Amino acid sequence: MPDATLKVVINAPIRPNQPGRGFYQLEEDALFVPIGIYAADRRFFSFIESEHVRLDCDKAGELLFIEITLARKQWQIDGALVPPKHAATADLRWLDFRAQMPNPAVLTDKKHSLVCIKFSDAKPATAYQMAEAVIAEVTKELRVCRIWITEIIDDVAGKEISAFRRQQSAS
């Protein structure tokens, strides 16, 4: 697996833990992961993508959304998959705008209850909580080698993700 090219800048957290979790769109066979409060001032600016994974960022490099278009039945099952137990809260800013990346591995447990997007085989130096159910593992060179989505909700017709966004914008 190629080395991760996903360079980030890590700063002290600027806000409390952000909302975020996975919503598996059953009719589209895609996983949508909104990150952070849904607000008018948080707008899409650029992306980092591969054939099946897309990371959407705002103009400051803050991650807003993850989309995995690889169907759940094609995720690689790893029975020993365990997310990091401890993750520090931090403000991660992505630097590789409009970048193409090699296809990462999309791994899951036997129940399909979590996902690990594995960008490289590099050893992570630390883990950062990007949102309630989203963790990034980063190498000592400040490259993201894995992103974990630790909570996934099955969604039909976007009802669950829509309710999540309404709840977050009302907060």
Image (cartoon, rainbow, N blue to C red):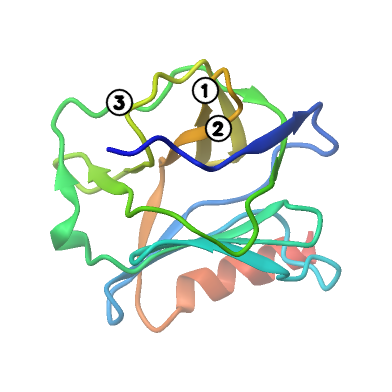
Q: Residue at x 60, y 64 (%)?
A: 98
- Determine whether label 2 and label 1 are within 8 Å by CB: yes
Q: Residue at x 72, y 34 (%)?
A: 9
Kind of residue sitting beneath label 1: Thr
N-terminal label among 2 and 3: 3
Task: Find disc 2 in the rendering and name its residue.
Answer: 143
Residue 158 % position (x, y):
45, 79
Nearer to us in this view, 105 or 99: 99
Q: Residue at x 36, y 53 (%)?
A: 102
Task: Find disc 1 in the rendering and name its residue.
Answer: 139
- Mark 1: which secondary structure? loop
Placement of 156 over or under 82, stated as above or below: below
Q: Residue at x 66, y 37 (%)?
A: 8
Q: Quadrant of residue 78?
A: top left
Measure the alpha-carbon separation of dots 2 and 3: 20 Å
Residue 87 % position (x, y):
56, 22
Q: Which mark is residue 82?
A: 3
- Determine whether label 2 and label 3 are within 8 Å by CB: no
Residue 47 % position (x, y):
59, 64
Categorize mark 2 by other alpha carbons within 10 Å: few (<14), some (14-19), many (20+). many
Measure the alpha-carbon separation of dots 2 and 1: 5 Å
Kind of residue sitting beneath label 2: Arg
Number of numbered tags placed on the structure image:
3
Q: Is residue 38 left or right of residue 164?
A: right
Specify the quadrant that holds the N terminus: top left
Q: Which mark is residue 4?
A: none
Q: Is residue 104 left or right of residue 22?
A: left
Categorize mark 1 by other alpha carbons within 10 Å: few (<14), some (14-19), many (20+). some
Kind of residue sitting beneath label 3: Val
